[in-house]
Image (tube, rainbow, N blue to C red):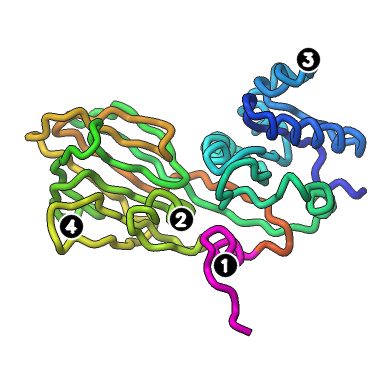
Amino acid sequence: MTQTYKTIGLIGKPDHDGALATIAALHHFLEDNNYHVLIEAKVAKVLNKAEHYGNEITAIGEQADLAIVVGGDGYMLGAARVLSCYDIGVIGVNRGNLGFLTDLSPDNLIEPLEAILAGHYKTEHRFLITAEVYRHGQLKSSNSAMNEAVLHPGKVASMMEFEVYIDDDFMFSQRSDGLIVATPTGSTAYSMSAGGPIMTPKLNALSLVPMFPHTLTSRPIVVDGDSVLKLVVAAENHEELQVSCDGHVILAVMPGDEIIIKKSKYTLRLIHPTDHNYFKVLRNKLSWGNKIY
C-alpha cells in the first residue's frame, strides 16, 4: 500500500465499548500495514497498550499526519478544537447518533480507509470561531468553538437583556433566553433545533439565532463570516450568565460584560472519502426525501 500518511493518531471515547473495539481493530490493521500509530493516552490505558500511554491529543497533533477520531459528533468537536491548531488531517468514525462530522461507518471501515490511506480522498477546511469575555476592558476568559457559541443564562427559562453589534455597528437590543452564533458546521446542530438556517460548509458566514425572544419580529440572520460580533450584556441582569462553546466549554459572564465572537485563525482539515456528498449526508441524517424518479 502506498503510504500517503506515515504517522496516524487514534482518538476515541475511553468509556465506550464500541469505540474501543473499533480503535483496537484500527490499531491492528495499521500496524500490520507498517504505519506508525499513536493512541490517545486514556484509550491506550484501557486497551493495555503501555507503549502509547504518553500520547495526549496535543502530541498527536504535533507528530501525526492523520488523526482518526472514533465517536460521535460531540467527541469529534472536542478533538477538533485541539487538532485545528496543528497541520493534521482528521477523519471521523461514527460511534454516536447523527454523525454529521464522522464519515466512516464502523461496520464498513477498512475498505474506505484503505482508499484514503492510498491517497484517494477529498479535503475540506472548516473554520472555527473564538469567544472572548471582557470585563471592564480586560480579557477574562476565551475559548474556541467549531459549531456555535451561545450566550445564555445559567438557569433554564430565565430571560436576559443584551445588545448586539456587528463590526461596531449597533444591530439590535433584545430580551430573550439568549443568542446562538453558529458556523456553517454548526448550522445542523443546536442552531437548527432553534429554527436557524442550514448553511452549506463552504459558506463564509455566521448565523445569529435568537432563543425565545420576547418579540414577534425577531428572526435569525446570516452575516459575513469575517464579521466581528460584540454582545454587550445589560448591567441590569441579575442572573448568572454563561457563554457555552459547543456545549462543552463554559465561560462565566457577569452583568455589564462584553463578549467578542469572531472567526478563529485556525481551521480544521477534514478528510472525506471520494464519494462524500454534503447533500447526501443531509438526506440521510435528516430523513429528507430522495428523487421521485
Label 3 crowd bin: few (<14), some (14–19), many (20+), radius 10 Å: few
Which of discs 3 and 1 lies nearer the camera? The answer is 1
Q: Position of residue 82 (x, y in %)?
A: 55, 34
Q: Which residue is mark 3?
A: 50
The residue sitting at 66% across, 39% down in the picture is 69
Quadrant of residue 143 within the rendered picture: top left
Q: Position of residue 140 (x, y in %)?
A: 29, 26
Disc 2 marks a residue whose amino acid type is Thr
Q: Which label is found at residue 188?
A: 2
Separation of residues labelled 3 and 1 (CA atoms)? 42 Å
Disc 4 marks a residue whose amino acid type is Met
> Between disc 2 and disc 4, whose residue precedes?
4
The residue sitting at 28% across, 60% down in the picture is 220
Q: Residue furthest left?
A: 236
> Between disc 2 and disc 3, whose residue precedes?
3
Q: Which residue is mark 4?
A: 171
Asked if the residue under mark 1 is in contact with the one under mark 3, i.e. CB atoms within 8 Å, the reply is: no
> Between disc 2 and disc 1, whose residue precedes?
2
Q: Position of residue 108 (x, y in %)?
A: 78, 50
Which of discs 1 and 4 lies nearer the camera? The answer is 1
Disc 3 marks a residue whose amino acid type is Ala
Q: Which label is found at residue 279?
A: 1
Q: Position of residue 156 (x, y in %)?
A: 24, 36
Which of discs 2 and 3 lies nearer the camera? The answer is 2
Q: Is residue 99 above or below residue 42?
A: below
The residue sitting at 23% across, 32% down in the picture is 155
> Between disc 1 and disc 4, whose residue precedes?
4
Report the span colored magenta. Answer: 277-293
